[in-house]
């Protein structure tokens, strides 16, 4: 086994370990002649070969045929789920405190490992919007010295179903309906709720997807989870159960559902653009990798089953220990070659990491390789540059479509005498992988463990753990979704299922739908029951309400996942100004914000530059037609009487402020700028100047306002405004 490499900087690692390995595959046309794929220089790429200037094209035109054939074959099937994604290269640095837990080389002290992380939405097609209400994929490929390790997770710690056999049904239910391919990238439709309403194991994850977790502010501000219980194995062979967590250093934040819908129209690439720009600007996204560790002997000490992926371990029961940090440092060179062709697989593990018997995990171990064979066209997808291990690869596997490796010699089998038995098997001491030996004495059965038949308790735990505003958002989301369900049966049954989680939740959703919650009496709540089974064995008791709460499940600013992370780093501020604005004051504010890592953009009535009241000019970034407040984190109205007067007469500027207020964003205004806030204070926003998160100053001096505005920005949002304005909670 190779020794861990010496401590290096991010750039060194990204350059040496994987980026350099990719180097021979990079192509740069700058300064080069145009050629065919055979390297023949092309003299005319404007006209096909014809029988006469106005005659038919000739079959002889090898250049035309090569170019057209390649084009005709450019597309590959999109991923059956997680089709839309964005990715980046980075580096993982082990803190070195996990040695007792695992022998995995990449988690040993001082080791840094290149990674490639692909984020995704699940239900939508490749061309759908980033801001769909959906789970986000969080798949990390570690190019370790012991081989590739893939941690293929999501931004939600539980899953919809308990057994992988049901995955195709679940995906068919959530994807656009097969008869009319409607709706795109949305769960708000009949087949999804038909599935939900008869499969109550989905209830816990349903609540997560209806929460703001499904509307991340950016990929950089999401948690990631390995979901399943895995095992860590140390050098002595001792193993423990682990759950993986990624904790973003910028905290976990979301946008409002109305904003998400606007962003989907204004900038469907909002998340991938944010990721790309942040990396280009050197604001590298960072997460800590943490683990929850459960000793083998404690396997049965919880009131849920560790093998059930619809359950999480509350962090208050088993704290998350940070064991390393990941930093994304480089954008891909080519979307298709890297982001599209990257192939993750749960079965890509390294010594020191092993699986559990979670039936969802076990099924995934089959599905990922199988899907790559279809998607990437054959068994050699591991040779595609982005998928290549940086550890040497030697085995007897040969041939297949598009084989790249030129395997030398006459031997492609083992054991052998003709090649001195190489490649040889490796002992554990040489880095050879061995599975944790586990006694199994059981009947071969198709059966759900009784310990899995609790569908509502943790959904209730999640509900209990949410703040008032988070609960309101879940209620509103479910009202939105169920309003789009056309048939009564799935809608009514979903309400019954919600009532098993929390009667209050079901009643609030039902009130918005204008119906009463139907009675559960006589209903078989779980219809997903084997033909010969006793249905009673598959029925779960409702939540009792005594499930307690887990503060780490809330995204509130003071929740354990956000506490201590308040910052305005990488936040976007719209500065509203036009001709006549106080340009020096704007420049001072912009500098102050930038000093703290935020960015400001000037939004004006016209592009080009604006003339300040003192004659200075200021470059404009956007107009009210080209952008929207939904694309910003905070809004500042600059002083300058003429500028503010012009803005108050511009309906789009008034709307800009009004929407920022509705979406509970920090808003600042100094001196004359206050007039625009007043103009925006219609319909429910009459108290705009005294509302939380609105920072105004009589003075033109930015210094007197900036600290309060920055403090407000650190809060991210002032959701209490929405609570106060809600008439039908
Ligand atoms: Fe999956 C892709 C995450 C359950 C089958 N899955 C895929 C991706 C992520 C996840 C992040 C995208 C990877 C990429 O960016 O290329 N999947 C999960 C999580 C699950 C989960 C966290 C539950 C804990 N998945 C799951 C099950 C099955 C699959 C139960 C099937 C038995 N998933 C697939 C797949 C995909 C996939 C069909 C589609 C594209 C791909 O694999 O490469 O095989």
Image: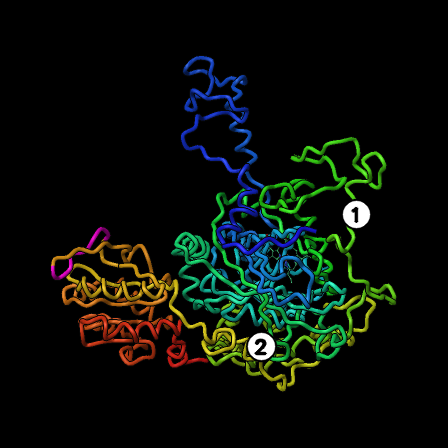
Say whether residue 176 is visible.
no
Say whether residue 385 is visible.
yes
Label 1 or label 2, whichever lies nearer to me, is 1
Seen from the viewer's position, the closer of residues 237 and 546 is 237
Prevalent SS, magenta region: loop
Residue 430, x across and y down, in percent = 74, 52
Residue drawn at x 63%, y 61% is 108
Region of the chain picked out in magenta, as a range? 607-614
Residue 476 is a magenta residue: no
Is the C-beta separation of discs 1 and 2 under 8 Å?
no
Task: Give left or right: position of 726 versus 560.
Answer: left
Which of the two discs, 1 and 2, labels the residue nearer the N terminus? 1
Give the Cα distance between marks 1 and 2: 47 Å
Q: Residue 55 is drawn in which quadrant?
A: top left
Furthest residue to the bottom?
Answer: 546
Residue 454, x across and y down, in percent = 70, 76
Q: Which mark is residue 425?
A: 1
Q: Is residue 357 above or below residue 511?
A: above
Q: Which mark is residue 462?
A: 2
Residue 214, x across and y down, in percent = 52, 66
């Amino acid at each position: 086994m190779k020794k861990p490499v010496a401590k290096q900087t991010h750039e060194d690692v990204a350059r040496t370990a994987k980026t350099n390995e990719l180097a021979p595959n990079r192509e740069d046309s700058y300064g080069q002649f145009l050629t065919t794929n055979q390297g023949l220089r092309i003299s005319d790429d404007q006209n096909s070969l014809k029988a006469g200037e106005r005659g038919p094209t000739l079959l002889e035109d090898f250049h035309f045929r090569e170019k057209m054939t390649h084009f005709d074959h450019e597309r590959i099937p999109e991923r059956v789920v997680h089709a839309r994604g964005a990715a980046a290269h980075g580096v993982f640095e082990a803190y070195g405190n996990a040695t007792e837990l695992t022998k995995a080389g990449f988690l040993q002290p001082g080791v840094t490992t290149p990674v490639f992380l692909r984020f995704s939405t699940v239900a939508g097609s490749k061309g759908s919007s980033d801001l769909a209400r959906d789970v986000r994929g969080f798949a990390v490929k570690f190019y370790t010295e012991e081989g590739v390790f893939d941690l293929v997770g999501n931004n939600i710690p539980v899953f919809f179903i308990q057994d992988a056999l049901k995955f195709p049904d679940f995906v068919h239910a959530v994807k656009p309906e097969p008869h009319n391919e409607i709706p795109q990238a949305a769960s708000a439709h009949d087949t999804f709720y038909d599935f939900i309403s008869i499969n109550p194991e989905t209830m816990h994850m349903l609540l997560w997807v209806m929460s703001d977790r499904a509307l991340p502010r950016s990929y950089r501000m999401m948690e990631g989870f390995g979901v399943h219980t895995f095992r860590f194995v140390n050098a002595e062979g001792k193993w423990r159960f682990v759950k993986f967590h990624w904790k973003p250093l910028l905290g976990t934040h979301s946008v409002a559902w109305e904003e998400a819908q606007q962003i989907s129209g204004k900038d469907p690439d909002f998340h991938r653009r944010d990721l790309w720009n942040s990396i280009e600007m050197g604001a590298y996204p960072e997460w800590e990798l943490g683990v929850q560790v459960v000793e083998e002997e404690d396997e049965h000490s919880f009131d849920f089953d560790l093998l059930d992926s619809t359950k999480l371990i509350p962090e208050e029961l088993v704290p998350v220990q940070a064991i390393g940090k990941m930093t994304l440092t480089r954008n891909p060179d080519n979307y298709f070659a890297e982001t599209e062709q990257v192939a993750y697989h749960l079965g890509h593990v390294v010594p020191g990491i092993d699986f559990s018997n979670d039936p969802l995990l076990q099924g995934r171990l089959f599905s990922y390789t199988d899907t790559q064979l279809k998607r990437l066209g054959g068994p050699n997808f591991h040779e595609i540059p982005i998928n290549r291990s940086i550890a040497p690869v030697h085995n007897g596997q040969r041939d297949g479509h598009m084989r790249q490796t030129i395997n030398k010699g006459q031997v492609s089998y083992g054991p052998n005498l003709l090649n001195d038995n190489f490649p040889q098997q490796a002992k554990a001491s040489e880095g050879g992988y061995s599975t944790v030996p586990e006694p199994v004495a059981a009947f071969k059965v198709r059966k759900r463990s009784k310990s899995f038949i609790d569908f509502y308790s943790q959904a209730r735990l999640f509900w209990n753990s949410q703040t008032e505003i988070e609960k309101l958002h879940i209620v509103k989301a479910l009202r939105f979704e169920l309003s789009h369900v056309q048939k009564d049966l799935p809608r009514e049954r979903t309400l019954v299922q919600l009532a098993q989680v929390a009667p209050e939740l079901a009643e609030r959703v039902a009130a918005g739908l204008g119906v009463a919650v139907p009675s559960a009496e006589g209903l078989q709540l779980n219809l997903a029951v084997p033909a010969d089974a006793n249905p009673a064995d598959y029925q779960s008791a409702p939540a009792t309400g005594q499930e307690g709460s887990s503060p780490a499940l809330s995204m509130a600013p003071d929740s354990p996942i956000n506490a201590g992370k308040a910052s305005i780093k990488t936040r976007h501020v719209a500065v509203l100004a036009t001709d006549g604005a106080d340009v020096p004051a704007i420049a001072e504010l912009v500098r102050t914000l930038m000093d703290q890592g935020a960015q400001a953009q000037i939004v004006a009535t016209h592009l080009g530059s604006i003339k300040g009241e003192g004659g200075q000019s200021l470059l404009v970034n956007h107009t009210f037609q080209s952008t929207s407040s939904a694309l910003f984190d905070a809004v500042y109205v600059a002083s300058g009487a003429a500028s503010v007067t012009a803005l108050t007469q511009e309906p789009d500027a008034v709307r800009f402020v009004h929407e920022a207020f509705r979406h509970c964003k920090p808003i600042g205004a100094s001196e004359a700028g206050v007039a625009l806030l007043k103009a925006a204070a219609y319909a429910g926003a009459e108290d705009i100047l005294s509302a939380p998160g609105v920072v105004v100053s009589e003075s033109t001096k930015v210094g007197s306002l900036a600290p309060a505005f920055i403090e407000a920005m650190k809060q991210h949002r002032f959701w209490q405004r929405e609570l106060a304005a809600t008439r039908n909670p």
